[in-house]
Amino acid sequence: MYPEINPHAQGHLDVGHGHQVYWELCGNPQGRPAIFLHGGPGAGCSVQHRRLFDPQRYHILLFDQRGCGRSTPGACLEHNTTQDLVADIERLRIEILQAERMVVFGGSWGSTLALAYAQSHPRHVAALILRGIFLLRRAELRWFYQEGASWLFPDHWQDYLAPIPADERHDLITAYHQRLTGPDDAARLRAAHAWTQWESRTISLLSNPEHLRSHATDAAALAFARIENHYFHHHGFIEEGQLLAQASQLADIPGVIIQGRYDVCTPARSAWDLHQAWPQADFHLIPDAGHAYDEPGILKQLLAATDHFAHA
C-alpha cells in the first residue's frame, strides 16, 4: 500500500434531517478525482483506506456514510436509505471534490453503493473499481444471515444465534432488527456485538485479529449492526435484482471487478453474474482469498486497478 497520509482538508457536510456527514480530502488537489465508498453499511472509513491510491496522482475523497464513523448522529436509522446515500455522493462530488467526473471505488456494500450511484449518474463516473460484489438480492442475504455460510462456520454461527430464541430463528434478520431497534439497552448491545462478530470472524480466508478489533467497541458495534441490519431488513431500499437488471447502463464505463474465490460474506456468484451482465469490465477471481480488501491477492489487484485508472 502507499505510505500513510493525512487529509489536507476535512469537515462535515449538512445533508439535512440532522445528518452531518464527515468527509476528508487527501492526496494531490490537481490529481485525478476519486471517491472511496466503504463497506457495511455502517463500517466507516479508516486511515488505511487512504493508502489504496497514489497520493501524487489522485485527489481522494473519503467519507463516513450516514450514522457511522465520524458522521453524526451515530447509529441513526432515520433518513438513512440507499437513495439518501446516492444523493450524498452527488453532493460531495459537486460541493467538496468539485469534479465533473471521478473514479468510484467500492468494496462489499461499497460495491453496491457504487453500482447504484453509477446507474443513477453514469456521466459523472470516469471508472469503477469494485471488490467483493454484493447485489443485495434476497438469496445473498439468506446465504449469509439465515442459511448457507453457517455450514462452513458452525462454531461462529452458534454465537450469532445466541441472542435469538429458537422460535424466532426462522427469520434472523427480522429477529435482530427487533432487538437492535428495541428499548432494551442490554439486549441491543448484545445483539450488536453478536451480529458484528459474525461478519468479523468470517470476512477473510484466514482469521485476522485486526478484523475482530475493527468494530469491537460498543459504539462501533452498534453503528455497524444497526445500520447494516436496517438496510438488509428493508432489502436495501431497492427492487429485487435491480442492480443487475440495470447493468447495461455501465456499458460505457471502464471498470474492474475483483472477487475472492472463497468469499463467504458475498459469494463469487454475484461477481460472476455482474461480469456476465457487464462484460466490458476486467474480471479478477482471486484463487486464495475471502472477502477482506487487505488479503494479499485482493490488495494486489486493487492497487493495480487504482494505478491503472490514475492515468487511463
Image: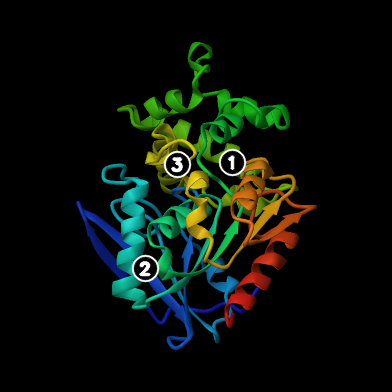
Instruction: Look at the image and tell me whether residue 38 can be seen.
Output: no
Q: Quadrant of residue 176?
A: top left
**Earlier sequence position, callout 2 versus callout 3:** 2
**Residue at 50% in and 40% down:** 136
For mark 3, give the secondary structure: helix
Labels 1 & 2 near each other (Cβ < 8 A): no
Few, some or many residues within 10 Å of mark 2 (<14, 14–19, 20+): many
Residue topped by disc 1: 199
Q: Which mark is residue 19?
A: none
Q: Horizontal and vertical percent for residue 212?
A: 61, 47
Q: Depth check: 161 or 303 in front?
A: 303
How far apart are labels 3 and 1 at the CA level?
Answer: 11 Å
Q: Which mark is residue 23?
A: 2
295 in relation to 269, above or below: below
Instruction: Look at the image and tell me whether residue 290 can be seen.
Output: yes
Q: Horizontal and vertical percent for residue 48?
A: 56, 67
**Earlier sequence position, callout 1 versus callout 2:** 2
**Earlier sequence position, callout 3 versus callout 1:** 1
Amino acid tagged 1: Glu
Residue topped by disc 3: 228
**Residue at 50% in and 44% down:** 245
Q: Residue furthest top?
A: 167
Labels 3 & 1 near each other (Cβ < 8 A): no
How far apart are labels 2 and 3 at the CA level?
Answer: 20 Å
**Residue at 31% in and 46% down:** 80
Amino acid tagged 3: Glu
**Residue at 19% in and 51% down:** 17
52 in relation to 161, above or below: below
Amino acid tagged 2: Trp
Q: Horizontal and vertical percent for residue 56?
A: 55, 87
Q: Depth check: 73 or 58 in front?
A: 58
